Amino acid sequence: MRCVLNFLGADDMSFQADAAGWTTIGQVLAPDHTALQLVEVAILFQGIVVADEPVLVQLVRQTDAGSGGVARDLVHEHEVEGIIGSSRYKPILTQGFVDIDTTEPTTENILRSWHIHPQNGIVYPYRPSHGNQEYLTCAPQRRLGVRVYPEDNVNVTGYIVINEGDMVR
């Protein structure tokens, strides 16, 4: 099943990533017996100064949840009103966390890095670029996170789309 974790702060608004330090803006934890497959990541900033330095964004594997984060439910990407109670939609098993700012999670591996201007954003569809390259997957009970390192305080929002369970190849 395809589901989405929205990186939103209080009141479903963007939240602030503090200057000169890592902030994990979103993290998914794969369930006990289900792998996850990354489909898409989007990061959007609300900077106000044209001359600000680009923000370093990383897609990472993390070993813990850190602290100070907000547990957030994932949602089905293609919900149709009236069908959610049917057998077509299984419950989402994946846990999501956003705005982890008290203690940053431990990063195990950096999978991808890119710079984004703080007045801009990016939608990064994760698709294999070569015939033999696999989709990026997250093993059961493992964590996949998105973190940012801004030079100045900046508001950030975004989302991560994953396949859970039967759709993972």
Image: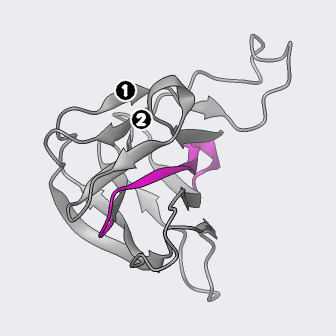
**Where in the figure is residue 25, as x and y percent of width and height?**
38, 48
Dot 1, crowdedness within 10 Å: few (<14), some or many (≥20)? some
Residue 152 belongs to magenta span: yes
Residue 151 found in image quarter: bottom left
Image quarter of the N terminus: top right
Mark sitting on residue 117: none
Q: Amino acid at mark 2?
A: Gly
Is 168 in front, or is 107?
107
Q: Amino acid at mark 1?
A: Ala
Residue visible at 21% across and 32% down? 68
Marks 1 and 2: CB-CB under 8 Å? yes
144, above or below 60, in the image: above
Which residues, given as a range, are shown in magenta? 150-168
Q: Nearer the viewer, residue 153 or 34?
A: 153
Please, is residue 78 above or below residue 115 in the view?
A: above
What label sits on residue 96 in the rendered view?
2
Spot occupied by residue 130 in the image (x, y as percentages of width and height): 62, 89
Name the element at disc 2.
strand
Q: Tell whether position 92 is magenta.
A: no
Seen in the picture, residue 134 relative to 46 is either above or below; the reply is below
What residue is drawn where x is 38% and y is 34%?
Answer: 31
What residue did someone put label 1 on?
71
Asked if residue 95 lies left or right of residue 81, the reply is left
Residue at 63% over, 73% down: 127
How far across and how far down the image is residue 47, in percent?
A: 50, 61
Residue 116 location, x and y as percent?
49, 75
